[in-house]
Image (spheres, helix red, strand yellow):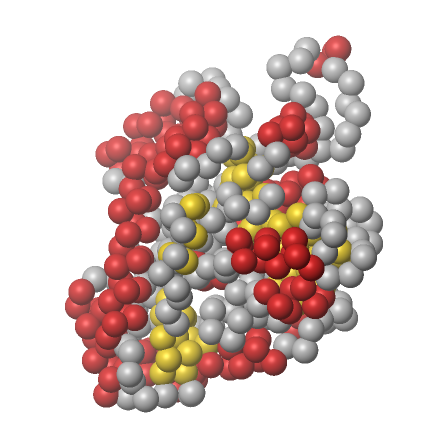
Amino acid sequence: MTPIVKVFMPPKEILLPAVESVLYSGMVGEGEHVYTFEDKFKSMFNIDNGFAVSSGTAALHMALILSGIQQGDEVVTTSMTAEPTNTSILQAGGVPVFADVDAKTGCLDIDSIVDMVTDRTKAILIVHYAGYVIDVQALQSKLETTFERHINIIEDCAHALGATIDGITVGTIGDFGIYSFQAIKHMTTLDGGFIVIKDHSLNKIAKKIRWFGMEKGVERTKLDLDILGYKYNMNNVTGIIGKIQLDYVEKNIKAHQFNAEYFNENLNNISGIEVVTLEKRLKPSYWLYTLLCDDSENVIKLLGGIEVMASKLHRPNHYHSLMTNFKRANMVNLDSFYKRLVHIPCGWWVEEEVRNLIVDTLKRG
Ligand SMILES: Cc1ncc(COP(=O)(O)O)c(C=O)c1O
């Protein structure tokens, strides 16, 4: 079965000696390999400022705290995402308010975001869903022209490493951006994440939040704990894995994009199936490929018949009993998107033969 997501590991002969040297170095916690991973990651993805952390969820929680979320503050968010996007809002004491999505991409709809903003809105949490892209600059200018105050935008780029808008890396346009290096993402450090922070003056406090609330490098007996922090650091073992993963990630992202563009061209004009294309300036990194189908269940079955896994993968978060009572827009677009949605694999592991088989099977119907 061709899976819809897959763990990428660099070749054993390269990865294992490097990991072994760190494991037996006596320095397995946060240290040199975390900091050099941060530098390499930032330079590869043109990120000006940010820090490696233990997970994407940790990065989200930190971004929400740094946005000043207090108990009861509202965060306009999406239901069409993995659960941690929204559980992190609850963890920070905030209240998710669900805006509707774009019926084609599943990313938030800008007008619906604006409609859901109230005086209690402290931040807007957008997700570049499945690696497709929401136009962050358009959202920023809409917010600027509609509201007198600045509302922080947090970009959840867990699905979107390598996606760009006008050539600019997603996650660096809003006030904060987050990445996930969990097992099945474009790159993995087993678990890990990254927080991008636009305002450098928050760096000191961000580093403290990452480390129990304490400043690293200060003698423990002289240190005053004055804010609540968490155990959100990356360690040297995952740091070295990350550095080696970075040697492969550009090639892997390009393979996702190549396969997706192939599907965009070859699955176009099939009755009952719609492909999702964006304006040229929005360049997705296609963690998953999105098809919109009149009969999604049948398409999933059809692809199952040729040993290709297809699926909706996520469950809209407002369907969960934990989140069903939060304020939400009329979700007409989400309902239509989710009904028609089928994700198919388009990652680095999908080779020509499978690509052609998918296209032929869907053409035959
Ligand atoms: C959209 C989205 N946001 C956040 C996360 C959380 O990332 P992590 O698993 O690294 O905590 C995930 C994935 O798990 C995700 O898919």
Residue at image coords 70%, 43%: 67
- Residue 282 in view (yes/no): yes
Residue 189: % across, % down: 43, 40
Left or right, residue 260 beside residue 155: left
Residue 221 image-quadrant placement: top right
Q: Quadrant of the N terminus?
A: bottom left
User: Farthest residue toward the front?
Assistant: 145
Residue 305: % across, % down: 29, 81
Residue 136: % across, % down: 53, 54
Residue 342 image-quadrant placement: bottom left
344 over 177 or under it: above or below = below
217 over 337 or under it: above or below = above
Instruction: Please state the total of marks drawn on the protein image.
Output: 0
- The front one of 259 and 136 is 136
Left or right, residue 187 beside residue 320: left
Residue at image coords 53%, 25%: 30
158 over 365 or under it: above or below = above
Left or right, residue 21 beside residue 211: left
- Residue 87 in view (yes/no): no
319 over 70 or under it: above or below = below
Residue at image coords 32%, 83%: 302
- The front one of 81 and 55 is 81
Residue at image coords 66%, 57%: 145
Residue 293: % across, % down: 41, 83
User: Farthest residue toward the left?
Assistant: 353
Q: Quadrant of the C terminus?
A: bottom left
